Amino acid sequence: MQFNIRLPKKLVYDMEFIAQNLNISRNDWLKVKIAELISKEIEKTKLNIMETAEGRFILGMIAAEDFKEIMGFKPTKEMIEERQRQISLSKRGKLSAKKYILDIAKKVDTIGR
Protein backbone atom coordinates (compact mmCIF):
# COMPACT_ATOMS: atom_id res chain seq x y z
CA MET A 1 0.00 0.00 0.00
CA GLN A 2 1.26 3.44 -0.81
CA PHE A 3 -0.06 6.89 0.05
CA ASN A 4 1.14 10.47 0.00
CA ILE A 5 0.93 12.73 3.01
CA ARG A 6 1.90 16.34 3.69
CA LEU A 7 3.57 16.91 7.03
CA PRO A 8 4.47 20.16 8.77
CA LYS A 9 8.14 21.14 8.36
CA LYS A 10 8.81 20.87 12.10
CA LEU A 11 7.54 17.30 12.11
CA VAL A 12 9.75 16.43 9.13
CA TYR A 13 12.79 17.97 10.87
CA ASP A 14 12.02 16.04 14.06
CA MET A 15 11.66 12.81 12.10
CA GLU A 16 14.96 13.49 10.36
CA PHE A 17 16.64 14.08 13.72
CA ILE A 18 15.34 10.77 15.07
CA ALA A 19 16.21 8.85 11.90
CA GLN A 20 19.78 10.19 11.85
CA ASN A 21 20.36 9.32 15.49
CA LEU A 22 18.92 5.83 15.06
CA ASN A 23 20.86 5.30 11.83
CA ILE A 24 17.78 4.40 9.80
CA SER A 25 16.04 6.14 6.96
CA ARG A 26 13.23 8.53 7.75
CA ASN A 27 10.85 6.51 5.56
CA ASP A 28 11.69 3.23 7.30
CA TRP A 29 11.18 4.79 10.72
CA LEU A 30 7.86 6.26 9.60
CA LYS A 31 6.68 2.93 8.14
CA VAL A 32 7.41 1.14 11.40
CA LYS A 33 5.62 3.76 13.51
CA ILE A 34 2.57 3.82 11.26
CA ALA A 35 2.40 0.02 11.32
CA GLU A 36 2.64 0.02 15.13
CA LEU A 37 -0.18 2.57 15.47
CA ILE A 38 -2.42 0.74 13.01
CA SER A 39 -1.77 -2.59 14.71
CA LYS A 40 -2.69 -1.19 18.15
CA GLU A 41 -5.83 0.44 16.77
CA ILE A 42 -6.88 -2.78 15.03
CA GLU A 43 -6.52 -4.75 18.26
CA LYS A 44 -8.55 -2.18 20.24
CA THR A 45 -11.27 -2.12 17.59
CA LYS A 46 -11.46 -5.91 17.36
CA LEU A 47 -11.71 -6.18 21.15
CA ASN A 48 -14.47 -3.56 21.18
CA ILE A 49 -16.41 -5.43 18.48
CA MET A 50 -16.02 -8.71 20.37
CA GLU A 51 -17.14 -7.21 23.68
CA THR A 52 -20.13 -5.55 22.04
CA ALA A 53 -21.21 -8.76 20.30
CA GLU A 54 -20.81 -10.77 23.51
CA GLY A 55 -22.79 -8.22 25.52
CA ARG A 56 -25.56 -8.02 22.95
CA PHE A 57 -25.81 -11.82 22.83
CA ILE A 58 -25.89 -12.16 26.62
CA LEU A 59 -28.61 -9.51 26.92
CA GLY A 60 -30.70 -11.32 24.31
CA MET A 61 -30.38 -8.57 21.70
CA ILE A 62 -28.95 -10.90 19.03
CA ALA A 63 -29.40 -14.60 18.36
CA ALA A 64 -26.67 -17.23 18.42
CA GLU A 65 -26.70 -17.34 14.61
CA ASP A 66 -26.12 -13.59 14.41
CA PHE A 67 -23.33 -13.85 16.96
CA LYS A 68 -21.66 -16.60 14.92
CA GLU A 69 -21.98 -14.53 11.75
CA ILE A 70 -20.33 -11.51 13.41
CA MET A 71 -17.63 -13.34 15.35
CA GLY A 72 -16.97 -16.40 13.22
CA PHE A 73 -17.56 -18.82 16.10
CA LYS A 74 -20.48 -19.98 18.22
CA PRO A 75 -21.19 -18.50 21.67
CA THR A 76 -19.39 -20.31 24.47
CA LYS A 77 -21.17 -22.43 27.05
CA GLU A 78 -20.50 -19.75 29.67
CA MET A 79 -22.05 -17.07 27.46
CA ILE A 80 -25.16 -19.19 26.89
CA GLU A 81 -25.51 -19.81 30.64
CA GLU A 82 -25.10 -16.10 31.40
CA ARG A 83 -27.67 -15.26 28.72
CA GLN A 84 -30.19 -17.62 30.33
CA ARG A 85 -29.49 -16.09 33.75
CA GLN A 86 -29.91 -12.54 32.41
CA ILE A 87 -33.18 -13.40 30.67
CA SER A 88 -34.47 -15.03 33.85
CA LEU A 89 -33.55 -11.94 35.90
CA SER A 90 -35.21 -9.71 33.34
CA LYS A 91 -38.45 -11.69 33.46
CA ARG A 92 -38.49 -11.58 37.28
CA GLY A 93 -37.81 -7.84 37.17
CA LYS A 94 -40.68 -7.28 34.76
CA LEU A 95 -43.03 -9.34 36.91
CA SER A 96 -41.99 -7.45 40.05
CA ALA A 97 -42.52 -4.11 38.31
CA LYS A 98 -45.93 -5.21 37.02
CA LYS A 99 -46.95 -6.40 40.51
CA TYR A 100 -45.78 -3.12 42.04
CA ILE A 101 -47.77 -1.06 39.55
CA LEU A 102 -50.90 -3.21 40.10
CA ASP A 103 -50.54 -2.81 43.88
CA ILE A 104 -50.34 0.96 43.52
CA ALA A 105 -53.35 0.95 41.19
CA LYS A 106 -55.34 -1.04 43.79
CA LYS A 107 -54.38 1.40 46.55
CA VAL A 108 -55.39 4.37 44.42
CA ASP A 109 -58.65 2.63 43.52
CA THR A 110 -59.51 1.93 47.17
CA ILE A 111 -58.64 5.49 48.22
CA GLY A 112 -60.90 6.90 45.51
CA ARG A 113 -63.96 5.02 46.84
Image (tube, grey):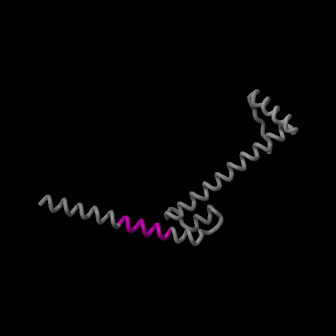
Q: Is residue 97 above or below residue 40?
A: below
Check the image and name the residue furthest to the front: 21
Q: Which residue is depicted at the point 38% across and 65% down?
A: 93
Image coordinates for residue 7, horizontal then vertical, percent = 75, 31
Q: How many marks?
A: 0
Quadrant where the C terminus sits is: bottom left
Please tell me whether residue 26 is drawn above or below residue 98 in the rendered image.
Answer: above
Q: Residue furthest top?
A: 9
Q: Is residue 18 left or right of residue 80?
A: right
Q: Residue at x 20, y 63 (%)?
A: 106
Which residue appears at 45% of the width and 68% of the height? 87
Q: Is residue 85 magenta?
A: yes
Q: Quadrant of the N terminus?
A: top right
Q: Is residue 18 left or right of residue 72?
A: right
Residue 45 left/right relative to 61: right
- Pinpoint residue 68: horizontal percent, then vertical percent: 61, 66
Residue 92: within the magenta?
yes
Farthest residue, direction right? 23
What is the magenta range? Answer: 83-94
Q: Position of residue 48 (x, y in %)?
A: 60, 54
Foreground residue, 102 or 30? 30
Left or right, 54 with respect to 43, comes to: left
Which residue is at 58% across, 58% downward? 51
Q: Position of residue 34 (x, y in %)?
A: 75, 43
Q: What predominant SS class does the magenta segment belong to? A: helix
Q: Nearer the viewer, residue 11 or 108?
A: 11
